[in-house]
Amino acid sequence: MAGGRELLTFFLLLVLHVQCLQGAKILTICFVGGSHYLLMDEVSRVLQDNGHDVRMFYQIGDGTLPGYKLPSTPYLVSTYSLDEKYLNEYEHFFTEYQKEFFMGKGGIQALFDLMSVLANQCQASMNQTDILNFLKQEKFDIAVIDGFNPCTFLVSEKLGIPYIAIFPGIFANSMAIGLPSPPSYVPAFPSQLTDHMNFLQRLKNTFMYIGSYVVEKKIEAIFSTIFERHFPTDSRPSLFDLYQNAELWIYNVDFSIEFARPLLPNIQYIGGLLAKPANPVSHDLEDFIAESGESGFIVVTLGSMLSTIPIKDLVKEMNSAFANIPQKVIWRYKTSLWPADLKVAPNVRLMDWVTQNDLLGHPKIRLLVTHGGINSVMEAVYHGVPVLGIPLFGDQFDNLVRIKAKLMGEYIPPHEIKSKNFADAIRNIVENKSYKTSAMKQSVILRSHPFPPDQQLVGWVEHIIQSGGGGHLRPYSYQQPWYQQCLLDVILFISGCIIVIIYLLVKVIRVLIYLLSSNRKQKQN
């Protein structure tokens, strides 16, 4: 009987292995545009190019990439368009908060507002019954989803497809997925701390960890209506359940910039998926770069979704700073929206879109001026390019803290930028060769991995499919109540034992003292 079960198990594993070699059916889900789309597009391409049958479920209408022409995809795409009400709501959110970000405002409320917008979008996604029914009938082997957006988990659960979550940055959600994060040396998000903390910083970090739990509960509350509408009461999961049910978590980060920290078997990292050997730039761009001589050039880009700067005074300060440095400047800025009364500095070239990876791989590159998005940061690390950061929102502050801690760059909040200090910061990084040396060191760390990011991605996805899921990678702690994970029951038991022992010792000592004092009195009498 046992031999028969072993033979059946072997046969099933063999079928799964053969199926994976022939190509699995994989659904990728992305409901956020910009850099999130670029990452999930690359994930989909890599899996498709490695023999799998990939389809992306993607909504169109928000988070577009200004100036970027979407290339044709080798994989299939299922899309739907958002309604006018949601598009207006998203446009209002993005427009209103742009100025806030550049003025150093926004904070945690901006995250909650963004999640509210995504929740409204999610309701529209869950109402796409025709597409959802079609995807369910396709019987995908696995879904690979954007782990930033809670809606991708809800859709995967609704479709009944096991899923792998790809988080597009640093370990910002470690509390939600149950990743061990000792606050003594693992900085919480968004603390802007390093792994070297003094007492007050560790105190701050501890409170930040407690606060991150509150933030996650708030985000879950924002999506609660969708849970109630689309899942029956007796089988309704929580957002924490969906996070921990992921077969695998893959992070778009690398320890060339991230601080060393404990991981679990179901947590993997493949930072630098978008970073590649550079292709030659266009002839006219090469001619512009050649004019720089030995001074070289710098690239300025503040994110895939941000093609302009909404504060005119800041544009003037940056433009003036560029006019006072010897390098050529390639600045991603929508030319039609450039202030009419402001003359572009003679060494600056404005472009609606830049092929950032190719420019960073050019031998004359000297500096990347960036908002600090993780894709830009990883491309800079890959090519060994120093960084000057202008953080605006989300993980960008923490990303740039890591860049500074690794000694490959500096950062300036946008509201503190003036022509002189901005130009001085550029000159300091370009002329101080230690930044370039540190950047090249991090590049060696990233590039010298035994397997490149695309091979790691394919290998882990195929491993999950062949092994029938990631249950063997998930720790038992996911099934334990919180008081057991924190050993509170053990601590209470030990404390109780200690109290009982101390109580008994005190009682014995009192009896001994009483007996001794009684004997003394009898002898005296």
Image (cartoon, grey):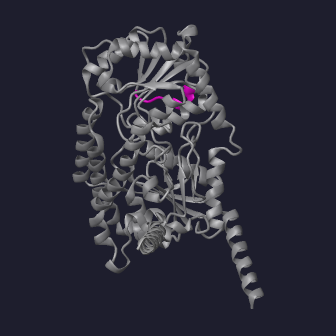
Does the image show residue 17?
yes
Q: Which residues are magenta?
A: 352-360
Q: Nearer the viewer, residue 463 or 234?
A: 234
Against 332, residue 177 (above or below) is: below
Q: Residue furthest right?
A: 3
Quarter of the picture holding the N terminus: bottom right
- The reply to whether the magenta stretch includes residue 354 is yes
Side of 102 where 158 appears, left or right: right
| Residue 31 drawn at (x, y percent) | 39, 53
Residue occupying image coordinates x 28% and y 61%: 221
Side of 457 where 183 appears, left or right: left
| Residue 421 drawn at (x, y percent) | 37, 14
Side of 221 where 179 appears, left or right: right
| Residue 352 drawn at (x, y percent) | 40, 28
Q: Residue furthest bottom?
A: 1
Quarter of the picture holding the C terminus: bottom left
